[in-house]
Image: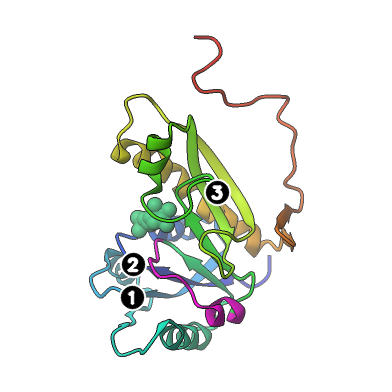
Amino acid sequence: MGEKLNLGVLVSGRGSNLQSIIDAVEEGRLEASLKIVLSDREDAFGLERARKQGIDAEWVDPSPHAGREDYDRAVVAKLREADVELVVLAGFMRILSPLFVESFRNRIMNIHPALLPSFPGLHVQQKAIDHGARFSGCTVHFVDTGVDTGPIIIQAAVPVLDGDTEESLSGRILKQEHRVFPKAIQLYAEGRIRVRGRRVFIDGGEEENGGQCLVNPPLGR
Ligand code: GRF
């Protein structure tokens, strides 16, 4: 393996996905170097997690910036200064401007707690329950200029159970987020991801699963 992939991670909150990336690097499952963690929130716990690990972590205050693009210009400058090759949105609650997206075209990944294209936007675990969906899950995708619309890299499905609350379903989904996000980044680090239009192809990643599929509720009951 050659050089490690330089990552920049953007967080707005507790940073459990950031932690899963830190852990994957520590455990050698992810050949990447965390160059910088940035947040739009001074009190984001993700900043603390990064600092604890000795990773450069900075709050980039949105208030002095006139608009989204102005703010994004400042963030992009910091990412470039840190030699970031892949930008990871791990619970970053701002919509990126076209300027940001173009600066890192197909080099920004986001994780979303639903099976896109179902339930883009916010509060999507509750929306999946309210809709009566039998499955939900999470999606890692490249970021384009839409909201949760970019090419899909990896998804994990979980059942929605009759007794689910927003909290219980979110917890079940979050466990899978922590598995698939580091994996998606590692696939990128290995140079195995190709994007053609809306579709993402993974070199050596295709496998028939013998007709196995998930059914909820299970057929046997
Ligand atoms: C996750 O549910 C992620 O899917 C969504 O924001 C949440 C971030 O959680 N984009 P955390 O800050 O990584 O714990």
Residue 205 in the image: above or below residue 64: above
Residue placed under numbered mark 3 in the picture: 116
- Percent coordinates x, y for residue 20 in the rendering: 42, 54
Looking at the rendered image, the quarter that the N terminus falls into is: bottom right
Q: Residue at x 60, y 49 (%)?
A: 154
Nearest the viewer among 23 and 205 is 205
> First in sequence: mark 2 or mark 1?
2
> First in sequence: mark 2 or mark 3?
2
Residue placed under numbered mark 1 in the picture: 40
- Percent coordinates x, y for residue 55 in the rendering: 38, 74
- Percent coordinates x, y for residue 151 in the rendering: 64, 58
| Range drawn in magenta | 91-103
Give the foreground label among 2 and 3.
Answer: 3
Quadrant holding ligand 1? bottom left
Residue placed under numbered mark 2 in the picture: 12
Mark 2, Cα crowd under 10 Å, few <14 / some 14-19 / many 20+, is: many
User: Ligand 1 closer than 8 Å to the CB at disc 2?
Assistant: yes
Say if residue 83 shows up in the picture: yes
Secondary structure under badge 3?
loop
